[in-house]
Image: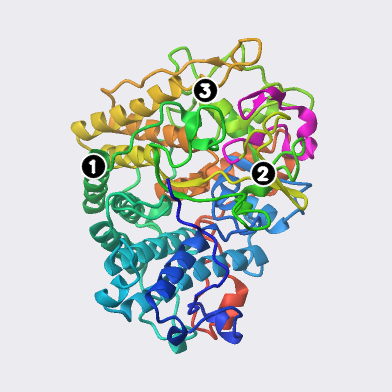
Amino acid sequence: MKKILLIIATSVSLLSCSDFLTQEPTAVLNTSEVSTSSSVEGAVIAAYASLGNDHYDTPFSLWPYGNVRSGDAYKGGRDPNDINDFGFMEICQSRSDMGEFNNMWFALYSGIARANSALKLLNSMTDAQYAASGSNATRTNRIAECRFIRGHYYFQLKILFNRIPYFDETVPAEKYASTSNTALSSEQIWNNIAADFEFAFNNLPATQTQVGRATKYAAEAYLAKTKLYQAYGMGDSDGSHYKITTPGQLPTARKSALDSVITYCNDVIANGGYKLASDFANNFLPNNFPGGPYENGSESIFSIQYSENDGTMFGRLDFGDVLATPMGVGCCDFHKPSVNLFTAFRTNSNGLPIASNGFFSWPINGSASFSTDTVPDLTVNTVDPRIDHTIAIPGHMFKYDQTTIYQQSWNRTPSIYGFFASLKENVTAGANNFDYIHVGPFYGNDKDRIVLRYADLLLWLAEAEIQSGDNGGVSAGMALINKIRERAANSTGLLKLANGQYESKYKVGDYPTNVTQGYAFSALQWERRLEMAMEGCRFFDLVRWGIVGNYMNSYYTTESKGIPAYLAGGKFVQGRDEFLPIPLPQMEFSHGAYTQNPGY
C-alpha cells in the first residue's frame, strides 16, 4: 500500500511564531512563488513531513514529558547532567531558560507554521484550480488534512505549556509578536483545537489511498480525546483540576463534554473499521518482523510514517526515540522504566493488580527491595504479560528475539538508573535480524509511531462512561476495560524463551462488573497505566485526574529509597508543575505580550 512520503527538500512555510520574525529563514517560498496546484500539494506534504521532524532532544513521542515526569521512567543516560534539562524536569526543577523547552516550543510551532502555510495557499485557490493538479482529493479534503495536523500540534502545546498564543492562517505575520498567550481563555483554546478536528471529521474520507494521511475517523478520535481533556477543565485559571488529594476520589468533569466523548468514540467503534490487534505486541513491531506486516495495523488510528532505503542518506528514521536504545545495542540508554512501573504489573491470585490503600493508590513502594546486583524473579509471582512487552528485563529476550537475551551489562549506569530498558519504541537487535540503522553514535529505526491507538480510544470511552455516574455507564466502562485485559491475557505468543518456557509467570483476570463508581474509576486509572505505559501519556493523565501533586511527591519519597537516590530531591508544587514554563526566549521575543505560567 502506498504511503504518503514524509520527505520534502523544501520547507514551504509562512512561519507563524514570534521568534521566527527576527531573521529570514532559508529555503522558504512566498505565496506568489507557490501558485500551481502541484506546488500546493507539496505544501500539504511539507505539513505532514513536519510530524517526523523531531529530534532526540525534542521528541514528539513526549517520552521525557509524559513518562519521565510521571514516575513511569527515569531519564537515563550517563547521569543526571546528560541532557540535564530533562534531569531537572524529572525532579520538578524546571526553569524558563532551559533550552530543551524552547526547542520543543519552536518545533511544535514550526509544524503549525507549515499547516497554516498550506491552508493559506489552499484558501487562495478555487476548487477548479486545485482540481487541475489531477489529485483524487478535493481542495476541501486537503484543507481538512492540514487542520487535523494543526490541531495535533496545538493539542501537544496545550498539554505541555497551557498558556499558548493561537495563530491560524488568517492572522497576518505583523500581528504575531503582539499576540498575547492569554488573549484566549483555556476553554477557547480547547474549542479551537476541537474545531479543527471537527472540520476534519466532517470533510475527510473514511479511508485514504495513501497510508499516513488523516482520515475521517482519525479526526473523530482526536476530537474525542480533546473533549475528554476539556471535560476536566485542564488548564483553567481556577486550577480546579488540581484539587484531588485523596486516593479514590473522583475528579469533577463536565457532563456535556463527556457525552461528546461517548458519542464520538462509539461512532469510531461502529464505523471506523478498527479493532484490537490479536496480540499486544503487534502494535510495536516493524513490518519485517516474522508474521508481518504490522505497521498501520488494525489498531492504528493514526501513525507517523518512517522509512529507510528511500533515496536519502539515512532514511526517514524515528530520531525522536533514538536515545532509548540500550548500550548493548548502541546508544544511549535513556528512557529507563522505573521500579515503580515494574511493580505495577504484579497480579494477585485473581489476576488483578496488587495495590494498597484501596484499589487505586499512590505509587507502590517496591524500590527498597532491589539493589544493583539483583533482578526480580518473575517466575515465582504472577504478572501481567504486558510487562514483557514494555520493559526489557535482564535474562529475558530483547524484543522477542530468542537469540538475544537482555543483559545487565547493557545498562550504562545501573547504580543510578537501574537495570531496565524501554521496549515499545525499540526493535530487534540479534545478529540474524539487525533492524537498527547506525547514524553517528545513534541507532535508529524506521518503525512507525502510533499517535492514536484503538485501545487508547476504548479507555477514553470507558473513562467517560464511568464518569457519567449511572450504573449502565459503570458496567459499560468495566466491560471495555475487561476487553483490553482479555487481549493482554492472550498476548503471550512471543514471550517464550528458546527452551520453551515463558519469560515470566503470567496471570490476568477480568474485573468484576457489578462495582461502585469509585472502584471502576480506580480500575480505569490502573488499566491506562498498564496498557499505555511508556507511550508518553502518563503524566497528562495524572494532571487530568487532578492527582499529580500527591502522586509525584509520594513517588519521590518511595522510589528514592532504592537505586535512584537522586529522586529524593524531587518536589512537585501544585499549581506550578502541571505545566512547563513559557520558554524565556519566547517571553523576550514577545516584547511583553506573553504572561509566564504561575510559579516560574
Extreme residue toward the bottom, this view: 174
Instruction: Measure the C-alpha gap from mark 1 to mark 3.
Output: 30 Å
Q: Is residue 327 visible?
A: yes
- Residue type at numbered disc 3: Pro
Instruction: Measure the C-alpha gap from mark 2 to mark 3.
Output: 21 Å
Q: Crowding at label 3, few (<14), some or many (≥20) Cα neighbours within 10 Å? A: many
Label 2 belongs to which residue? 324
Magenta extent: 397-425
Mark 2: which secondary structure? helix
Label 3 belongs to which residue? 385
Residue at the spot 45% in from the left edge and 69% down from the top edge = 42
Q: Is residue 571 visible?
A: no
Residue at the spot 64% in from the left edge and 50% down from the top edge = 90
Tag 2 and tag 3, C-beta contact below 8 Å = no
Tag 1 and tag 3, C-beta contact below 8 Å = no
Mark 3: which secondary structure? loop
